[in-house]
């Protein structure tokens, strides 16, 4: 029963967090350890402001390299991008951008990011389900909501994970195995929203 209460509380906290995103609240950018909205992290100098809602939809990017900083690109140096062996990538018919970093000769080292439009309601439902059903941790950096989880690869001695960031009806969804460049998601967020 206590596990159900904790899961329910986490889901309610995520609902409150996403509701706050549309109301211009400022956030710390660090994981919350309690539902106290005034909690801040000492490592965060100033909270990122939440942008005012706009009527125009944020444009989706069309170039997998252009959305990354030089530092992140340096960490990915030598890793093929969008190799045909991994299937469809690049810009889809609906404008969704899929970026696949990985060498097809490697058994597990890869990173797949999909950037798409996602309305607030479905995004809220999906993120709540990840918290409640799969134990993801969510926090609110850069005027959006970020949920993430790492776990051991079931076949190889490496770490796998998934990171999602939602803001202004744009969802950045990254799944990775043994390849997690420092600052990767933050770099995409800065490119799209700053």
Image: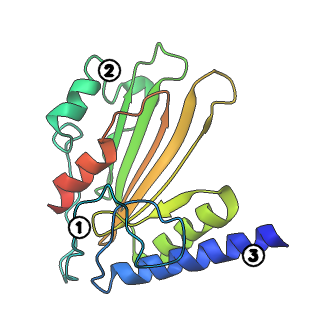
Does the CB distance between marks 3 and 2 fall below 8 Å? no
Quadrant the C terminus occupies: bottom left
Quadrant the N terminus occupies: bottom right
Query: Residue 141 appears in which quarter of the rendering?
Result: bottom left
**How far apart are the alpha carbons under marks 3 and 2?**
44 Å
How many residues crowd mark 1 within 10 Å: few (<14), some (14–19), many (20+)?
some
The answer to whether residue 87 is seen in the rendering is no
Query: Residue 50 appears in which quarter of the rendering?
Result: bottom left
* Residue highlighted by disc 3: 5
Q: Secondary structure at mark 3?
A: helix
**How far apart are the alpha carbons under marks 1 and 3?**
31 Å
* Residue highlighted by disc 1: 48
Q: Which mark is residue 79?
A: 2
**How far apart are the alpha carbons under marks 2 and 1?**
32 Å
Q: Is residue 191 above or below residue 175?
A: below
Q: Secondary structure at mark 2?
A: loop
Residue 21: percent from left, percent from top = 35, 78
* Left or right: residue 14 compared with residue 78: right
Going 32% across and 71% down the picture, which residue do you hit?
A: 27
């Amino acid at each position: 029963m206590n596990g159900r209460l904790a899961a329910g509380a986490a889901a309610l906290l995520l609902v409150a967090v996403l509701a706050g995103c549309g109301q211009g609240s400022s956030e710390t950018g660090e994981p919350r350890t309690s539902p106290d909205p005034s909690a801040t992290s000492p490592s965060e100098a100033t909270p990122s402001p939440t942008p005012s809602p706009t009527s125009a939809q944020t444009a989706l990017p069309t170039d997998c390299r252009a959305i990354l900083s030089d530092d992140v690109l340096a960490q990915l140096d030598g890793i093929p991008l969008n190799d045909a062996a991994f299937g469809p990538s690049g810009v889809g018919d609906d404008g969704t951008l899929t970026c696949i970093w990985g060498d097809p000769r490697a058994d597990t080292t890869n990173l797949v990011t999909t950037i798409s439009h996602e309305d607030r309601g479905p995004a809220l439902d999906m993120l709540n389900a990840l918290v409640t059903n799969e134990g993801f941790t969510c926090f609110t950096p850069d005027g959006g909501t970020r949920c993430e989880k790492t776990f051991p690869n079931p076949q190889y001695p490496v770490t796998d994970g998934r990171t999602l960031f939602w803001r202004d009806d744009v969802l950045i969804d990254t799944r990775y195995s043994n390849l997690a460049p420092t600052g990767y998601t933050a770099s995409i967020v800065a490119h799209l929203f700053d």
